[in-house]
């Protein structure tokens, strides 16, 4: 059972689970450039070799929050902590995005069979090795990101609640890191042609 709407992208020899704010635009742009025949599956896996990308949970949360803030006219200080941490989309954000980009990445993994994980920091190398090309897409604003990081640092209660919220994500992330399911460059090409 999936706990949210998941997007699997199926190709001839693999499927990719899209997790927002982990480099998915870079992956999809690579697929387009390679002219891969891709079928989108919602909440359904094909059973092929499945891979996805994971990111440090706090970095991902900050990136998601920054993206949502950039789409709206909401001031960071006006956001309710519970809205952020329990993924209630602010009414002004709902108009521009249906996905709460601050949701834990572990919720994407519940019920999913993942054969290989790629660290966000290794994504560029993974795409080059496995597809011969990589497109780094980073549309985030460093101004907003710095403002969010400063806000978190200056608001200790917020930071404490955020750390509690991300605890399960960090636990699962660490368990996956320890189980040899992460791709690293020495593994070379793992996606068959």
Image (cartoon, rainbow, N blue to C red):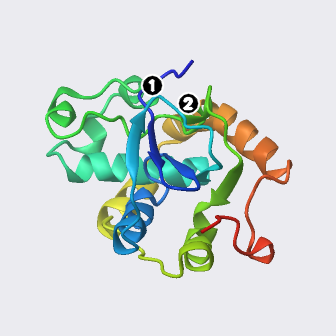
Q: Which mark is residue 79?
A: none
* Quadrant of the rendering where the C terminus is positioned: bottom right
Q: Residue furthest top?
A: 1
Q: Which mark is residue 4?
A: 1
Res 110 quadrant in image = top right
Residue at coordinates 54% horizontally, 41% vertically from top-left?
159
Name the secondary structure under disc 2. helix
Please, is residue 2 above or below residue 112 in the view? above
Question: Which residue is identified by label 2?
Answer: 107
Q: Mark 2 or 1 closer to N-term?
A: 1
- Distance between the alpha carbons at the discs numbered 2 and 1: 7 Å
Please, is residue 115 above or below residue 110 in the view? below
* Quadrant of the rendering where the N terminus is positioned: top right
Res 180 quadrant in image = bottom right
- Residue 60 percent coordinates (x, y): 50, 51
Nearer to me, 74 or 8? 8
- Residue 165 percent coordinates (x, y): 58, 31
Please, is residue 168 above or below residue 146 in the view? above
Residue at coordinates 73% horizontally, 63% vertically from top-left?
183
- Residue 49 percent coordinates (x, y): 65, 49
Residue at coordinates 54% horizontally, 49% vertically from top-left?
15
Count of number-bearing discs: 2
- Residue 46 percent coordinates (x, y): 55, 37
Contact flag, marks 2 and 1 (Cβ < 8 Å) = yes
């Amino acid at each position: 059972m999936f706990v949210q709407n998941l997007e699997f992208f199926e190709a001839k020899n693999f499927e990719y689970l899209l997790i927002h704010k982990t480099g998915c635009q870079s992956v999809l742009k690579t697929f387009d450039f390679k002219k891969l025949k891709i079928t989108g599956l919602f909440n359904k896996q094909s059973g092929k070799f499945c891979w996805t990308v994971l990111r440090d949970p706090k970095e991902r949360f900050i990136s998601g929050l920054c993206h949502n803030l950039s789409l709206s006219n909401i001031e960071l200080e006006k956001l309710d902590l519970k809205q952020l941490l329990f993924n209630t989309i602010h009414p002004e954000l709902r108009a521009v995005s249906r996905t709460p980009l601050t949701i834990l990445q572990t919720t994407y993994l519940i019920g999913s069979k993942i054969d290989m994980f790629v660290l966000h920091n290794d994504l560029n190398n993974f795409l080059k090795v496995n597809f011969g090309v990589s497109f780094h897409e980073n549309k985030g604003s460093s101004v907003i990101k710095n403002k969010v990081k400063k806000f978190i640092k200056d608001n200790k209660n917020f930071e404490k609640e955020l750390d509690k919220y991300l605890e399960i994500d960090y636990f699962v992330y660490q368990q996956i890191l320890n189980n040899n399911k992460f791709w690293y460059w020495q593994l070379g090409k793992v996606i068959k042609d």
